[in-house]
């Protein structure tokens, strides 16, 4: 599970990452990254933490499917949050195909999107 201090919770943080950050899309998800964003509401020590949030709409499936996708994505991000620069805001938006995807497919798409955002991938 992703630790609470690494979770995005406020609407402004989600909007900042989606509107002002870069994005990389894959068949099952889109990852938005705003590198080195500073949080004016955070204390000095927690401002350097990378925080991640998840958007899973009703287009993905019913409540059971959406919660399953969110749990899988949180679990996958737990190991990958250290890859991002300190202070980054990351939003993972699940696409409708993610409800039918298995854990391995979500991991593969997440890794590919992160690699592309961090400069290791090509279009």
Image: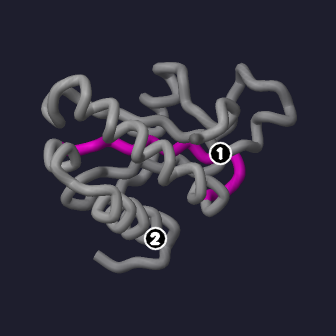
Mark-to-mark CA distance, 1 and 2: 16 Å
Percent coordinates x, y for residue 33 in the rendering = 48, 50
- Disc 2 packing (10 Å; few <14; some 14–19; many ≥20): some
Name the secondary structure under disc 1: loop
Which residue lies under the disc numbered 2?
115
Q: Which residue is mark 1?
A: 50
- x 22%, y 48%: residue: 98
Decide if residue 12 is on the left or right side of residue 101: right
Q: Range of the magenta residues?
A: 84-95
To which quarter of the image does residue 54 belong? top left
Q: Quadrant of residue 18?
A: top left
Picture residue at 31% right of the left edge, 51% below the top: 30
Up the image or down, 75 lies above or below 118; here it is above
Q: How many marks?
A: 2
Is residue 19 visible in the rendered image? The answer is no
Residue 4 in the image: state x and y as whole percent.
65, 30
Q: Is residue 111 magenta?
A: no
Q: Residue furthest right?
A: 45
How many other residues sit within 10 Å of disc 1, few (<14), some (14-19) or many (≥20)? many
């Amino acid at each position: 599970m992703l630790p609470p201090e690494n979770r995005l919770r406020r609407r402004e943080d989600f909007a900042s990452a989606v509107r002002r950050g870069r994005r990389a899309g894959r068949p099952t998800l889109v990852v938005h990254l705003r590198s080195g964003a500073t949080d004016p509401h955070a204390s000095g020590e927690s401002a350097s933490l990378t925080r991640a949030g998840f958007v899973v709409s009703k287009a993905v499936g019913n409540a059971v499917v959406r919660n399953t996708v969110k749990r899988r994505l949180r679990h996958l991000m737990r190991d990958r949050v250290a890859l991002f620069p300190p202070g980054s805001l990351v939003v993972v938006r699940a696409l409708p195909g993610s409800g039918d995807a298995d854990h391995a497919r979500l991991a593969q798409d997440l890794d590919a999107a992160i690699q592309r955002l961090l400069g290791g991938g090509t279009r």
